[in-house]
Image (cartoon, rainbow, N blue to C red):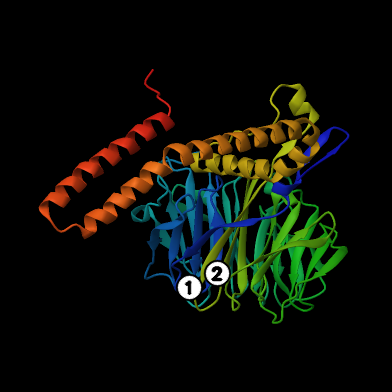
Amino acid sequence: MSTIANHDISLIGMSKHYTLCHRLEGSLEAVNCLVFSPNGQILLSGGDDDTIRVWDLSASQCIQSYCSQNWAQITSIEWLHCDSSPEGFSDWMSVGTGRGSHTLCPKATEGMKFLWNEATTTFPFDVNDPVEAQAYDPVNRRLALASHSGLLKMFKLRSKSLILLWDVKLYSDIPRSLQFFGPGNRYVLSAFLEQGEIISYNGENATIEWRRLLLGGIGNATISPDESILLVDNLTTNSFDLYRFPTGNLVTSIPSKAVERFVKGIVFAEGGKIAICGSDQQFVQIIDLTSQRRCQDLISENPSDIFQTVAAVSLGDHRHLIACGSSSKKPTIYVWEKMDFRFDDSAVSTGPLMRTHSHPGRSQNRDHKILDTLIVWFFQSLPIILLATHTIWTPYFWQLIGNVKSTTSAVQVTFDTNIQGPIRDVLSIVELTTIATSTSTASVTTTVTGHAIETVISSLSTFIPDHTE
């Protein structure tokens, strides 16, 4: 539906809700981590089956999977993008595992697959010390890795290898998340599970800049794109807490509706307008950060689904994708999509009615989805258009109905006069032929039948208009 106010038109029907667009099956055990490619065409997944999978979203299928003997469960994945590298690769996959190993794998310059024969694997932590979290700094090409035991290491991405810059012992606590922030990504924030504390480290020398004690154990924490809000999965109160960042002042707490105190995935989406939050109750919650309320639940088909990992990507300001992976016995990855179009005066005054956005890598399939959405909107709006203009078209409609009735009556009269009589003759003759026993009778019957058929054909020729002229 569309609303008009002060000459501003918003297609609310297409911008309010997410709809399911992909159901990806093939994971053998719980899905632990997900990440989109920047153009939204590829989704990477990893989980307890020790396998990385590369999903082509345009085809809704897994196009590549890889498992290494150096891995255990996949604990974290990051998509690394850099403008140039000595090998000519601009995109890399960074994989952390439960065996304390880290793998760096480049993506082919063409196509969607990764070059596993070019991958390098190192052991930044002990074999029994899993990689708990990682974060990438594209500005300075740095990668931060944190282990389950509380070690933080900062690396410089150089060629296909990682150069250690510094390392520090954080706590005898689990660092649940890492994130770069500040001017030039100068700082890195670490959030701790049991202590409920967040600590800001200087990315250059590992010194502590500040620390804040929050209101409970931290399952996950993430900073909004504008770095003004900190979203926290509070395991103590089973809620999602919003804090002012970096002051740490609590803004509000939103109940998660979770029954158990599982770690739940959280991520900002749509440029920080909404937050995506996992749960153990068969759905993923979307929180509108303007109203600070839940605005939609993305419900799965399996009542036993637990969503501990979520991911999101926005393609401009009109198309948004959300992915969530389940931890049930039959793991499934769901991808949800929202198309968001806007109409406004500035767009009309400059010529085109709708503002369009050009994005590299947009597939033809995506254009079809836009067209399909516009068609759906047209048919949804058609009743309102007809109601608003009924005084114009109803006289013509009833005149058309009258013409159709007149034509139908004329056709019926012609049919009764020219067709039904010869058909009755044919049926009578057929009845006679079935009881005829002599050769002469059959001969006469054949002659009469032929005459009747000629009569029917002649009648049809007068009934059907001649279009040969």
Q: Label 1 crowding class (10 Å Cα cut-off): few <14, some 14-19, many 20+?
A: many
Judging by the rendered image, the residue that carries numbered circle 2 is 32
Is the C terminus in the top left, top right, bottom left or bottom right quadrant?
top left
Callout in the foreground (1, 2): 2
Q: Can residue 29 be seen in this view?
A: yes
Tell me the element at label 1.
loop
Q: Could you tell me how many numbered marks the image carries?
A: 2
Q: To which quarter of the image does residue 409 belong?
A: top right
Q: To which quarter of the image does residue 20 belong?
A: bottom right
Tell me the element at label 2.
strand
- The answer for how far apart the CA atoms under marks 1 and 2 are is 9 Å
Image point (52%, 40%), residue name: 412
Task: Decide which of 17, 206 is in the foreground and name it.
Answer: 17
Image point (61%, 74%), residue name: 306
Judging by the rendered image, the residue that carries numbered circle 1 is 73
Of all residues, the one furthest to the bottom in this rendering is 260
Is the N terminus in the top left, top right, bottom left or bottom right quadrant?
top right
Instruction: Identify the amino acid type marked 2.
Output: Asn
Query: From the viewer's perspective, is 175 left or right of 40?
Result: right
Image point (37%, 42%), residue name: 422
Indicate which disc, 1 or 2, sits on the residue closer to the N terminus. Answer: 2
Image x and y of residue 194, in percent: 72, 78
Question: Measured along the vertical axis of the image, is residue 326 above or below residue 140?
Answer: below
Query: From the viewer's perspective, is 32 left or right of 354?
Result: left
Image point (48%, 43%), residue name: 90
